[in-house]
Image (spheres, grey):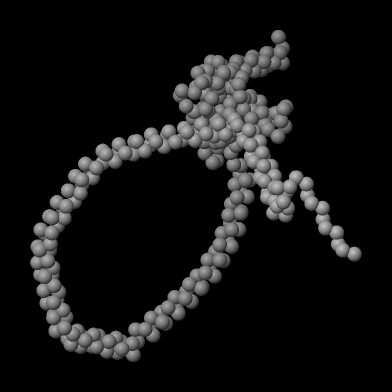
Amino acid sequence: MSLEAKVGTFVIGCLVLLAVTVYYVGNNQLGGHAIPYKTYLRYAGGVAPGTGVLFGGISAGRVTLVRPASGDPTQIEILFEVKEGTPINENSVAKLGSVTLMSSPAISITTGSNDAPRVKAGQVIRSEETVSMDDMARKFSTIADNAQGLVTEVRGELRGISGGALTLLAHLNDITGAPNRRRVAEILKSVNSLVATESPKIDRITDQVLLLSRDADSVMKKAGPLLDHTDTAVSNVNLTIDQLREPIRQDLAQLQATLDQATSTMKTIQTLVRANDENISEAVENVRVATENLDQLTEEVKQRPWSLVRIRQPKDRKVPQ
């Protein structure tokens, strides 16, 4: 065997050994058997085959394929495998994340809840979009622009506040100046003199109030028996009302029965009237016709009273020629 054949055989053997080693190391990392799942994101920055998959922050698998979704190209389909026995459930959520700010991106899956049903192999795991660095940069830029405007506005308001504070201090200086202090001292002297002058009157008013309170106490003592008599009268009235309550109740019951009978009678009369409505109308019409005939007869008698005695009307006298 030549030297080139030996070198080629050695290289091929090393490659086979490396492939076997990688295969076994991968299987050991995934617990010997991997379970496939998939999820969909609209932004999968930095995710590629081989990207790590974290479950609750611990390494659980790796990404196997990243491609646009066939049904909706605006979404990215991510296929990955996790270790057998990883408790992914229906409340678990997949999102783009990383362990630290400087580390490479990873697919992070939340632990969900223990009582939720487990997700079967090949099913889709619910996803949640994360804010990308570009979005964060845009938001920070917007915040910075707003902060600049806010600082400018605050500066303007601070100038107004400082001007108002200076004005207030000036007014306070005017108020606490020497002329105002003298006026306050004069007012206090006037109050002291007024108190000294009116003090005897206040004492007399206090004595009168004390006498009035004593008279009120005596009045209350005299009113005590009257109140007792009032209580007795109220008790007697209550007793009388109790005695009259039962007869009144019986009278009310009889009145209610009479009203019920009257209501029943009215209903019977209404039924009778409805049943004889046509007869009553006809009788009323006959009465009306008879009345009209009587009115005609009366008018005839008034105009020709001889018609009651003579059968024929006498001829009218001729006008002499």
Q: Looking at the picture, does residue 221 appear above or below residue 67?
A: below
Quadrant of the rendered image containing residue 148: bottom right
In the rendered view, does 163 fall on the left or right side of 287?
left
User: Where does residue 305 sit, x and y in percent of width and height?
Assistant: 70, 52
Q: Quadrant of the N terminus?
A: top right
* Residue 52 in sight: no
Looking at this view, is 220 or 154 the one in front? 220
User: Where does residue 162 sit, x and y in percent of width and height?
Assistant: 47, 74
Q: How many marks?
A: 0
In the rendered view, does 280 fall on the left or right side of 205?
right
Q: Residue at x 70, y 44 (%)?
A: 293
Looking at this view, is 160 or 192 the one in front? 192
* Residue 172 in sight: yes
User: Where does residue 95 sit, x and y in percent of width and height?
Assistant: 57, 33
Q: Residue at x 78, y 49 (%)?
A: 313
Looking at this view, is 98 or 8 the one in front? 98
Q: Looking at the picture, does residue 19 appear above or below residue 157?
A: above
The residue at the far top in this view is: 1
Q: Looking at the picture, does residue 23 appear above or below residue 232?
A: above
